[in-house]
Structures are given as C-alpha cells and as structure tokens.
Image (cartoon, rainbow, N blue to C red):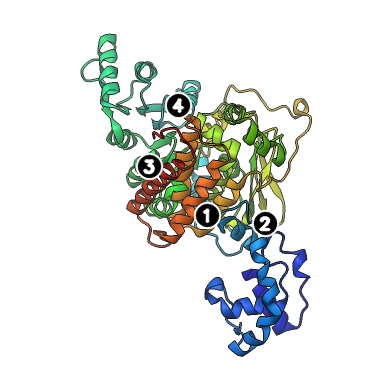
C-alpha cells in the first residue's frame, strides 16, 4: 500500500502515468481501489503509512477533499472484509508481507542493508582473507565442539580424523549420550567434557575412570548443564567454537565465546535468528570471524570470496522443498485433513539429507528456509528484499549470489554436510579431503522452481518477522521450536497448526511487548520464554491430549 501511495505522489508531481495498479499489486487487498480511494485512505489513516514511509513532498488531502470522496469510495471499503484469503488467515501478517515487498532482487543496494557478521563485503574482510590465505594450509586450529554427539558434531570429528595435523579437540559438549561421549573423550582427550545433566556427567566420570586411560592430571574437566556448555565454549586454549547445538540453547555460549575473541563455526541457526541484534555488534566489537557451517550459508560465503565491497546485489537460497515438495497445495491440505498419521510420518523424513528430527520437520514446513533468510540477512548484510528462495530438488546447487553486473555465482557439491563444516573450520584454506568428487554428467539435470507461499506459509511469516526485526525474530524462532517439538511428540497437533500457532505468537507479540531498538540478551531470552509459553497455552485449544514440553 505504501508503495502505491508513493506512486500516486510521483504521478502528481511529475505527470508520469503509472501502470494500472491491478496489474502490479498481486494479492494486495487494495488492488481494486482507484487513486481517489487511495488518497482517502491516506487522509483518514495516517498511522497506516507512518511518517518514515511518506516522502517529504507528499501532501495529505484535506478533510474537505476526504468528505467529497467519501461517498464515492464507500463501495470499495465494503469489499475489504470479503477478500478471498480472509477466511484462511487469522491475522494481517501474511497480507502485509506480500503487499509491501518489491520484486525480489530488484533493489541491489536498497534500504535495509546492514553490516555483515561474516567476513565479507568490506575492504577489511578482503585484506583479512588474503592475509590468512597467504599463511598456507600448514595451520593448526584448536576447536571446541558444542553438540559433539549430534549430526554436526560427529561430522566435525570425521574432519578431525581426516586432517589430524590441522585440528586438535580441546572441548566437547553433548546432551545425555554418555556412551558416545565416553568414546569421544577416549579418542580425542579433550580438556573439558560437558553433558546436560549431573547424572550423565557422573556416569561419564565413572566410565573414564574405569577405563584406566586417564591419569588424574589428564582426566577431562567433566561439567554439566548450561554452565557446562559455556565452560566448553570458553576453554582458554580453543580458538574456534563449532556450535552444533540445536535451538536457542546455543545463544549464551556463543556470546561468551565471542567475548573471548574466539571464531565461531556457526551451525546453530538460532544464534543469529534470535540473537542477531545482540550478536552482530559483539562480532564487530571483538573482531571475530563468524563462519557459516550450514550448507546454504557456507555456499553463499564461498561465492562471496573475492567479491569487492558493494559487489553483492542479491542472495539466492536454494531449498530441497522438504517432504511435501512433490505434492500440490490441494493434495497436502487434503492429506492433512484425512491422513494425519501419514502426514506425521512423512513430515519427519527428509528426501535428500540425513538430518536431525527438528530440522527435518522445519524442512517440511519450509520454516528452515525462512529462518535461513533471517540468518543470511545478519551474516551477509543483504536486505530482505534482496534475499530470494528457490526450490532445487536435487540439492546440488547449495545457494547462489548475484553480483551488481547480474552475474550469478553458485556453489555446487553432493549433499554432504562435511563440505560446509570443513570450510568453516579451515577458512580460507582448501584442505584435501577424501570425498567423492562431483559428477555433473551423472546428475544429468538441475531444476528450479518458485516456492508456493500459500502451501508454505512459514516462509512469509519469517520474512515478516525479519522485516520487523528487533525481538520479533526471537518470538518467531521460539514459537516454531515449541510447535515443532509438540508435533513430533504427537500430542495431537496438526501439521497446518504449526504456522497458525507461530502467526498467533507474532501477532500477540506485536500488540504487546515488541521491541525494535536497543535489544538486549535479557529481552531476547524473555521473548523466547514468552513465545514458548504462548504456544503451549494455545495448543490446549487445539489438542485434547496433555501437552508436556
């Protein structure tokens, strides 16, 4: 709506005719209004536009003009309540994102760009990259791995095994998988080993003591709980921390590691999604390198190597499409209604990647891609209008960038999470790895398509939260984590209830408690807790089974 109000003013001041509005607005609820009716909206609803959106030269029509137009415009307003999508969406969040978003990739250097947390897009980052590259590949890094028994952690340790001269493990943290943690401690002999509970920590200590492999001086410092994770992240000898913890639990240890000047190999999306307003200033203050370890952002990071300041025009994230990519919107909705158990099973099985349960379900809802949009904004500085999503079922092109001259640079590889992880811990070097080379002839063809945001409403919710910024992305993330967990726990929550609960949490937060500027860690943690409780309470109205988080 704001965009077309500006078009009206341009037409008035320059005499240039704009294109017919109904050809450009798409799903905008104002597409049927005449110019005079739009002027009426401007005159009686100044809060819709807001001063920061209105051009300095725009003159608001007088009350007298509004009166003359009122009768002429009445029929237009009567139809707003009968929009085709009104019955499908409980709030205005999804409408607002579709009506105000310019054509993706059309701005390039438009408003909304920020300083990146990754070492890209600046003259200083180019100099730093070159200096590190010239040091040669005969380096040794000491690493701490958060989430060592999970997918990211075990694959990181595979890299350590392949490159023993380049990496030393100083700290490990995990949940309650005591047996695997014991095996890792015996093999890598870390200085710190952290588990989630006191019982698990005591059991680990017993296993290591009975093994006879550690002297009293060599025994790892075995800790537990949130304090244990922070201790693993801040062990003094480590220079790089791999954050493989899922969820907001990775936020505090990452902050503490940054404060000590440690580089971050970032596999935890939520660190920037929830904590971006706090993390980015800390990265700049302490001069650390935020190095993406997930597939898509590593691809973008690799594509940006050597791109000069101001050279990036657009970020293009690729998505597998998740478990329901081959279904139409109508087929998915029918299945959700008639075959709920089949939906439950299919949503937690990924067609391409072997990932954790939470991320697999996020892929099915495509919230994972929405979260990656927010993460890309903080990592690379691009505005939300210059971050696109494209479905790529083969998962060979892991993401792309477009430069100012419209050249597209892509990173390709097999669907192997070790590739982005190894670059995050070895950047900017290229280590020789014993992996299968890519064979394009074997692949044969690569296909791409636009995502259906009606089929995947979580995409629009993520863009909306990102544009609002501040504490809204923390609410988005926490609400999604809570809804995701309850769906997997099979308490009776439906697949389509997930975006509904998230949208409700965002709307509730926008009306009460939303903070745009001067966001603190306490604000983020408070909003995170509120959103989880909101979803828990609202779920009671959706399901009949007891809800336990």
- Label 1 SS: helix
Report the side of 474 relative to 366 (left or right): left
Residues at marks 3 and 4, CA–CA distance in whole angstroms: 17 Å
> Residue 150 bears which disc, if any?
4
Do callouts 4 and 1 mark residues in contact (Cβ within 8 Å)? Answer: no
- Label 2 SS: loop
Name which of mark 1 and mark 2 comes first in the sequence: 2
Residue 455 sits above or below residue 349 on the image: below
- Residue sitting at x 49%, y 22%: 158
Q: Nearer the viewer, mark 3 or mark 4?
A: 4
Residue identifier under label 3: 254
Q: Position of residue 396 (x, y in %)?
A: 68, 33
Name which of mark 4 and mark 2 comes first in the sequence: 2
Name which of mark 4 and mark 1 comes first in the sequence: 4
Task: Name the foreground residue: 36 vs 223.
Answer: 36
Residue 525 sits above or below residue 19 on the image: above
- Label 4 SS: loop
Kindly tell me whether residue 148 is visible in this rendering: yes
Q: Nearer the viewer, mark 4 or mark 1?
A: 1
Residue identifier under label 2: 105
């Amino acid at each position: 709506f704001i965009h077309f109000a500006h078009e009206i003013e341009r037409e008035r001041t320059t005499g240039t005719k704009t294109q017919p509005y109904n050809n450009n607005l798409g799903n905008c609820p104002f597409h049927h209004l005449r110019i005079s009716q739009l002027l009426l909206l401007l005159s009686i609803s100044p809060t819709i536009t807001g001063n920061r959106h209105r051009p300095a030269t725009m003159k608001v029509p007088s009350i007298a003009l509004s009166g003359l137009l009122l009768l002429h415009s009445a029929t237009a307003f009567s139809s707003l309540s009968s929009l085709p999508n009104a019955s499908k969406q409980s709030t205005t969040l999804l409408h607002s994102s579709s009506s105000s978003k310019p054509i993706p990739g059309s701005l390039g250097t438009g408003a909304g760009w920020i300083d990146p947390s990754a070492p890209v897009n600046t003259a200083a980052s180019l100099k730093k990259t070159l200096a590190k590259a010239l040091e040669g590949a005969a380096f040794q890094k000491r690493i701490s791995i958060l989430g060592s028994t999970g997918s990211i952690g075990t694959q990181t340790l595979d890299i350590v095994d392949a490159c023993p001269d380049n990496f030393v493990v100083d700290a490990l943290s995990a949940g309650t998988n005591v047996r695997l943690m014991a095996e890792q401690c015996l093999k890598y002999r870390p200085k710190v080993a952290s588990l989630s509970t006191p019982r698990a920590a005591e059991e680990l200590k017993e296993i290591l003591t009975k093994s006879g492999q550690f002297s009293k001086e060599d025994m790892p410092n075995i800790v537990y709980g949130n304090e244990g994770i922070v201790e693993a992240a801040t062990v003094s000898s480590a220079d790089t921390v791999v954050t493989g913890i899922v969820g907001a639990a990775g936020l505090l240890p990452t902050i503490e590691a940054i404060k000590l000047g440690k580089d971050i190999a970032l596999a935890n999306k939520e660190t920037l999604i929830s904590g971006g307003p706090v993390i980015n200033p800390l990265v700049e203050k302490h001069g650390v390198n935020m190095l993406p370890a997930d597939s898509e952002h590593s691809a973008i990071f690799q594509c940006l190597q050597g791109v000069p300041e101001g050279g990036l025009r657009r970020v293009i994230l690729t998505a597998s499409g998740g478990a329901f990519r081959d279904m139409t919107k109508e087929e998915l909705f029918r299945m959700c209604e008639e075959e709920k158990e089949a939906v439950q099973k299919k949503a937690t099985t990924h067609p391409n990647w072997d990932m954790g349960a939470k991320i697999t379900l996020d892929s099915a809802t495509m919230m994972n891609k929405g979260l990656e949009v927010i993460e890309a904004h903080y990592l690379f500085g691009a505005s939300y209008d210059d971050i696109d999503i494209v479905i790529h079922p083969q998962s060979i092109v892991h993401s792309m960038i477009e430069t100012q001259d419209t050249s597209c640079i892509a990173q390709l590889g097999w669907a192997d999470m070790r590739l982005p992880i190894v670059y995050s811990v070895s950047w900017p070097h290229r280590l020789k790895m014993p992996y299968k080379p890519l064979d394009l002839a074997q692949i044969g063809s690569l296909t791409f398509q636009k995502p259906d945001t009606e089929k995947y409403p979580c995409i629009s919710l993520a863009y909306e939260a990102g544009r609002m910024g501040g504490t809204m992305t923390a609410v988005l993330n926490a609400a999604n984590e809570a809804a995701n967990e309850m769906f997997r726990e099979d308490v009776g929550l439906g697949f389509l209830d997930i975006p509904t609960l998230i949208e409700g949490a965002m709307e509730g937060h926008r009306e009460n408690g939303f903070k745009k500027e001067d966001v603190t860690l306490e604000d983020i943690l408070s909003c995170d807790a509120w959103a989880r409780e909101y979803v828990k309470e609202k779920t009671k109205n959706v399901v009949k089974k007891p809800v336990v988080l």
